[in-house]
Image (spheres, rainbow, N blue to C red):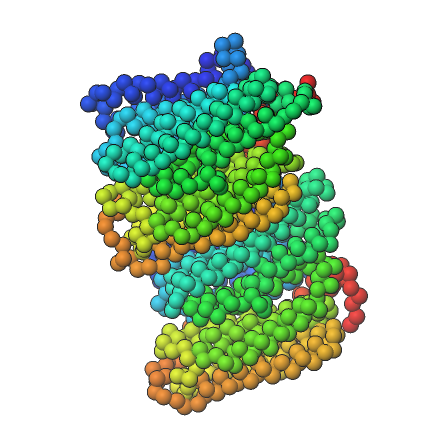
């Protein structure tokens, strides 16, 4: 069923309207933090629902250009982008719900924060919808600039400001690479529309593609920077550590997803010809990301820094699937999408719960702070354990299924060596994830200091819901009909992958 | 949906465990629930034993699709070899519970139940991903039970054993995935079920060798086979009694089970080719761990090595490639589980009552606790292999099997039985018989529950030693099937 074009871009409209109106409303005293959060949630839920309506109006993979006469293929609405939008919006909603307690108990937040939050989300959603390099750049910068401010928002803390500046300076530099790469691509192909670039290359096989190759590699550098892969990883730990916990959760889970979403589109559609050239570089990037990330994660005493470092390792796993795409692996592309979802759930759960626990004055951030935690708050400890197990990829959690796809995809496309490196990194990760479980369960409760908020309010319910979703994702199946389980997620991920090739400009499609 | 009996055996303990966690039940209630569950499972296992047909193939099959896009299914089944281990679990666990009756907390019982579920799941899985699922999930309650209820440097031990085991199983995972992909490349369909993976033909020899060792590493660590035993000592000595009981009596056997269930059908050629090495590794382990056992002062550590020593013997048996060796190995799995499990329970009682682990501090127990001593002696004689116990039957068969395989190996293995005899009797004399200090004066003889709990073990040790045919006929068709159909060997005798 074809809907009017305006319906397709409703999610975007809702988010940006929410952002602007919150900005205006923030001058009123009567808009408290809590009301601001409700307002944000309202717009996010509206966007979420309209996005689901979009997805459900089609029976199979789809791809449309809304307002083609106006935007001229700058924006695309396909299963792929809508699938990512679901999780981006979900990320926004969950961050808000989980952070509720945190935002209210820390005095330095104001309503503008939520406006910026919506702006950043708008940028991310636009990024996964964008079908053109300049649009993508604008979307990326909207998201990034909002992110810089969100990170430094709690004004009192020097750490926040340091993190914000670090990210600002390095992030802007990385952004410049993107725009330079885009202009080189334009120079060699006379277009910046995704699809047409690849089409041009496939029509002119004999042309000198070196400008195109350099341009593509410039964009790759921005991408590697944003996902904090080796050797562009140095900002990650300090920035993640410096940001307030909900923002860290948001960055680690949601932002990364948007960037992967765009990059997958670009690489799968356009860069078929340079993917193989990249392989030689990316193999080392992956191995070093895994090794260095594991090393950083082991040596951390602070839980937050450990999670930040280990997110690098997860980036490494996703990059494995990213290179596996090049050869044969049809399953590799959908495996990244699935892994992103798995990582998204586990990390937002872990960060969210930690932020909930440390939302009072006493910050609980090191391993030692969690000694004997299980004896005081058994349910919270159980949930935190579930998140750790999922991050470590232990069976019966969604993290295992995610790893299963990544490794299978890697082996399928002949990269068994990378799979072995990933296995070694996984084995190291068992140490630093299990350490938290050990600390929580195996020490007497007397060593727990300070007050811990009881299980009350919205946040714990949401976190418990995520924990159940993780278990369900790990074992759920076709036994319960009509309830989305693993199979459903995989099939949708596959459909999303197919939708990328509906409007194909390559020679072989024409 | 029709729920099969095997699924009930797996998921009943899980259900009980999670109900216990959510309901406000105390330690006693949890214990009763756990004990009752184990009895129900015993009954179910007995039903299976009775209905089991004397054939070599899989029975009581269950099959549901799990992750259809990758052909992963929830498929269960048992054959004669799984059956004996199932009976073992079903019999041993209620007995052990009677010995662990007092002084345990709710978390302890929940962990025990979950371990039992994991073991059953591992034992029934016919799909490799499902197998891996249970194999790995089983680690979590083990992790908890050692870490929370262990003694000594328990946290270090539990992290060490977890990391060690996960290394092995991750390599197994890669091998499983590799085979799944190979199946997909050859047939165009995803599948991870054992009977489909067996039919893969286009793997090169080098690939197969890598895969073989990927699987073998996981199982060798679990058993533990020399030289992957360095987790053993600390883990056994710092585990609580229930944990060490399950580890030594049952989980170690799962390593052997894995070799027979997966490595043998998947790589029959390599299995035959590498058999001589593994027979010798097994025999070497038998002697090496035996000598290590002689030197231990700590009684739990001594049993840890003695257990590893016999597992080496079992491994030698299953690689001996003939009916005697294989049957003997299957029989020794039972005998050893009963004897070692029983001994760890008995030693656990000493530790619990007196807080002593060192052999030299013990002594004079025989005069104060005669029934205890009788049981202790039965278990010990079984391990030593005295005629009249099932230990004798199984060791005799394995030695016969190894002789059939290679004479020199047979001679060495027959002689090395002496090692076991020497450390066991020496320990028995020092720790139990001879009069010593008054440190042991507080020991009480075992109570009625404990007598009842140990009775099935002692009874079976003797019954199986006197009348082995009673058990052989259940497993014989399966072993014939392994040798004839899977390994395509000629069977004589």
Q: Please name whichever residue, A428 or A31, is drawn nearer the observer in this view of the structure.
A: A428
* Residue in the image at 78% along x and 64% along y: B489
Q: Please name whichever residue, B247 or B208, is drawn nearer the observer in this view of the structure.
A: B208
* Residue in the image at 25% along x and 38% along y: A157
Residue B207 as seen in the image, left or right of residue B418: right
Point out residue A336 in the picture as x, y percentages from the top left corner: 54, 36
* Residue in the image at 56% along x and 63% along y: B221
Please, which residue is most extreme toward the bottom here? Answer: B435
Whether residue B12 is visible? no
Residue B436 as seen in the image, left or right of residue B60: left
From this view, report whether residue B77 is shown above or below residue A280. below
Quadrant location of residue A29? top left
Q: Which quarter of the image is occupied by the C terminus of chain A?
A: top right
Whether residue A114 is visible? yes
* Residue in the image at 39% along x and 56% along y: A438
Q: Which quarter of the image is occupied by the N terminus of chain A?
A: top right
Point out residue B408 in the picture as x, y percentages from the top left corner: 72, 78
Q: Please name whichever residue, A438 or B397, is drawn nearer the observer in this view of the structure.
A: A438
Please, which residue is most extreme toward the left here? Answer: A29
Point out residue B67 in the picture as x, y percentages from the top left corner: 58, 41
Q: Please name whichever residue, A369 or A443, is drawn nearer the observer in this view of the structure.
A: A369
């Amino acid at each position: 069923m074809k809907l009017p074009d305006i319906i397709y871009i409703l999610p975007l409209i809702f988010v940006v309207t929410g952002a602007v109106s919150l900005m205006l409303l923030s001058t009123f005293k009567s808009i408290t933090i809590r009301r601001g959060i409700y307002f944000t949630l309202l717009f996010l839920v509206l966007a979420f629902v309209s996005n689901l309506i979009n997805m459900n109006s089609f029976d199979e993979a789809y791809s449309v250009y809304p307002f083609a006469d106006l935007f001229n293929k700058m924006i695309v609405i396909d299963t792929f982008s809508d699938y990512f939008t679901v999780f981006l919006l979900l990320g926004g909603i969950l961050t808000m719900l989980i952070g509720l307690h945190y935002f209210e108990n820390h005095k330095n937040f104001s309503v503008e924060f939520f406006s910026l939050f919506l702006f950043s989300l708008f940028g991310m959603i636009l990024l996964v919808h964008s079908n053109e390099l300049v649009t993508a750049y604008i979307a990326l910068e909207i998201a990034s600039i909002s992110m810089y401010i969100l990170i430094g928002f709690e004004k009192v803390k020097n750490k926040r400001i340091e993190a914000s500046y670090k990210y600002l300076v390095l992030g802007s530099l990385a952004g410049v690479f993107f725009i330079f790469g885009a202009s080189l691509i334009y120079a060699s192909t006379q277009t910046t529309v995704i699809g047409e670039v690849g089409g041009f290359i496939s029509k002119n096989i004999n042309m000198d593609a070196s400008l195109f190759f350099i341009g593509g590699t410039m964009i790759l550098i921005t991408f590697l920077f944003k996902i904090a892969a080796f050797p562009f990883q140095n900002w990650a730990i300090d920035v993640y550590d410096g940001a307030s916990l909900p923002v860290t959760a948001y960055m680690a889970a949601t932002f990364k997803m948007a960037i992967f979403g765009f990059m997958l589109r670009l690489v799968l559609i356009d860069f078929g010809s340079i993917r193989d050239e990249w392989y030689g570089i990316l193999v080392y990037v992956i191995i070093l990301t895994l090794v260095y990330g594991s090393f950083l994660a082991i040596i951390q005493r602070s839980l937050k820094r450990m999670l930040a470092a280990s997110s690098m390792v997860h980036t490494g796993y996703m990059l494995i699937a990213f290179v596996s795409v090049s050869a044969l692996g049809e399953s590799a592309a959908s495996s990244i999408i699935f892994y992103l979802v798995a990582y998204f759930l586990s990390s937002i759960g872990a960060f969210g719960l930690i932020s909930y626990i440390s939302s009072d004055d006493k910050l609980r951030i090191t391993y030692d702070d969690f000694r004997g935690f299980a004896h005081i708050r058994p349910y919270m400890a159980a949930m935190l354990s579930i998140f750790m197990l999922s991050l470590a990829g232990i069976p019966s959690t969604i993290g295992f299924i995610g790893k299963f796809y990544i490794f299978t995809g890697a082996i399928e496309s002949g990269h068994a060596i990378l799979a072995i490196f990933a296995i070694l990194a996984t084995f190291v990760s068992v140490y630093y994830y299990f350490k938290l479980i050990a600390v929580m369960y195996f020490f007497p409760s007397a060593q727990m200091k300070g007050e811990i908020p009881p299980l009350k309010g919205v946040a714990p319910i949401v976190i418990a819901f995520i924990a159940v979703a993780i278990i369900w994702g790990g074992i759920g199946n076709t036994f319960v009909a009509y309830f989305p389980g693993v199979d459903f997620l995989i099939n949708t991920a596959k459909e999303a992958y197919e939708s990328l090739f509906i409007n194909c400009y390559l020679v072989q499609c024409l | 949906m029709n729920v099969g009996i095997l699924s009930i055996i797996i998921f009943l303990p899980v259900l009980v465990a999670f109900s216990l966690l959510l309901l406000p039940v105390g330690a006693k209630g949890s214990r009763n629930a756990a004990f009752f569950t184990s009895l129900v499972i015993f009954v179910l296992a007995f039903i299976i034993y009775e209905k089991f047909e004397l054939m070599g193939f899989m029975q009581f099959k269950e099959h549901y699709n799990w992750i259809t896009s990758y052909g992963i299914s929830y498929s269960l089944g048992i054959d004669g070899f799984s059956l004996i281990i199932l009976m073992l679990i079903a019999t041993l666990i209620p007995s052990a519970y009677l010995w662990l009756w007092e002084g345990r907390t709710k978390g302890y019982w929940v962990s025990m139940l979950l371990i039992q579920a994991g073991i059953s799941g591992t034992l029934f899985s016919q799909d490799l991903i499902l197998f891996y699922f249970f194999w790995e999930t089983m680690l979590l309650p083990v992790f908890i039970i050692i870490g929370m209820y262990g003694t000594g440097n328990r946290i270090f031990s539990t992290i060490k054993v977890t990391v060690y085991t996960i290394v092995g199983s991750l390599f197994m995972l890669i091998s499983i995935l590799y085979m799944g992909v190979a199946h997909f490349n050859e047939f165009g369909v995803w599948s991870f079920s054992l009977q489909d993976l067996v039919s893969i033909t286009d793997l090169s020899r080098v690939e197969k060798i890598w895969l073989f060792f990927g699987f073998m590493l996981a199982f060798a660590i679990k058993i533990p086979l020399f030289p992957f035993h360095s987790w053993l000592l600390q883990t056994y000595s710092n585990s609580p009694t229930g944990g060490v009981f399950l580890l030594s009596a049952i989980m170690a056997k799962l390593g052997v089970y894995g070799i027979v269930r997966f490595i043998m059908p998947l790589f029959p050629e390599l299995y035959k080719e590498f058999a001589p090495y593994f027979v010798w590794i097994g025999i070497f382990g038998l002697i090496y761990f035996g000598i290590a056992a002689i030197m231990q002062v700590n009684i739990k550590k001594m049993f840890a090595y003695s257990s590893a020593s016999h597992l080496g013997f079992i491994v030698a048996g299953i690689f001996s490639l003939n009916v005697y060796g294989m049957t003997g190995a299957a029989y020794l799995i039972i005998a050893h589980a009963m004897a070692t499990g029983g001994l760890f329970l008995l030693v656990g009682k000493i530790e619990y009552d007196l807080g002593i682990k060192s052999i030299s501090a013990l002594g004079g127990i025989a005069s104060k606790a005669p029934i205890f001593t009788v049981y202790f002696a039965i278990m010990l004689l079984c391990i030593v292999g005295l005629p009249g116990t099932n230990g004798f039957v199984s060791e005799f068969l394995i030695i016969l099997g190894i002789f059939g395989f290679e004479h020199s190996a047979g001679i060495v293995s027959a002689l090395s039985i002496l090692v076991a005899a020497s450390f066991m009797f020496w320990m028995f004399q020092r720790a139990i018989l001879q009069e010593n200090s008054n440190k042991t004066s507080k020991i009480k003889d075992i109570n009625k529950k404990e007598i009842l709990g140990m009775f099935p073990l002692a009874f079976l040790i003797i019954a199986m030693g006197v009348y082995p045919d009673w058990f052989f006929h259940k497993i014989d068709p399966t072993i014939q099937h392994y040798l004839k159909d899977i390994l395509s060997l000629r069977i004589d005798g």
